[in-house]
Image: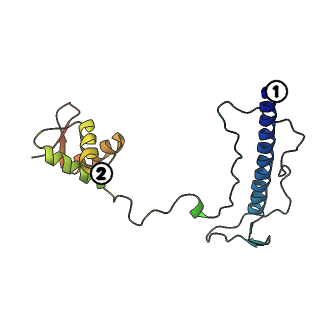
Amino acid sequence: MAKSALTQLQEQIEAVRREAYAEGYAAAMQAIQQAVSGQQAVSGGTTAPVARRRGRTPAAKTTEAPAKATAPAESAPARPARAGRSARAPTQAKPTRGRAAKAPAKAAGSRPGRGNNAAMIEEILRAIAPRAARPAEIRSALERDKGAAVAFTSIRHALGQLEARQAIEQVGDSKTWRIKA
């Protein structure tokens, strides 16, 4: 008795999940159709043309709807649920537009300036002078003192820049660097 009630409950949950998926799929396909046709839904069920970016030529518009832009058929067999997956309904896709939808805006000037890595590395090497340091030691000092996580490739590039300026020198055949006296 309890086993059949549990099975019946699971079937009901699966039916609700499939229905919610179908509704979300239909809404997403409608949003895609509107985006492809160059129109975006506005409150009240009307549509308005999407603003295009300046400097680009608009793509050729087609009035035909995509062939497979309908919700999945109700008679289609249900996929088996994956292990560990909850029976919650998937979220519906929200229509987005422009750059604002791609990434959150960054504060102006939040990117480090040009040559910043070389300046920080030179400062680290001056602080530990006259001793020489390997790139790994320079990297850990940058993280510890400056709070900057710099890739080894960037450290090597900055060392090359400083060497070209004759601000630092490589110690013999070793992989250590020091400030020139």
Whichever of labels 2 and 1 marks the residue nearer the N terminus, that label is 1
Q: Which quarter of the figure has residue 64?
A: bottom right
- Residues at discs 2 and 1 in contact (Cβ within 8 Å): no
Residue at 19% across, 51% down: 123
- Expressed as whole percent of the image width and height from the top left, the position of residue 46 reads 79, 72
Q: Nearer the viewer, residue 149 or 17?
A: 17
- Expressed as whole percent of the image width and height from the top left, the position of residue 167 reads 18, 49
Tag 1 residue: 1
Residue 167's place in the image compared with 8, above or below, is below
- Expressed as whole percent of the image width and height from the top left, the position of residue 35 reads 73, 62
Q: Nearer the viewer, mark 2 or mark 1?
A: 1
Residue type (three-letter) at the residue carrying disc 1: Met
Task: Give the class, few, some or many, for how many residues have Cα within 10 Å of label 1's Cα (few <14, many ≥20).
Answer: few
Q: Which element type, helix, strand or loop, lies under badge 1?
A: loop
Residue type (three-letter) at the residue carrying disc 2: Asn
Q: Label for residue 117?
A: 2
Residue 41's place in the image compared with 125, above or below, is below
Left or right of residue 119, residue 126 in this image:
left
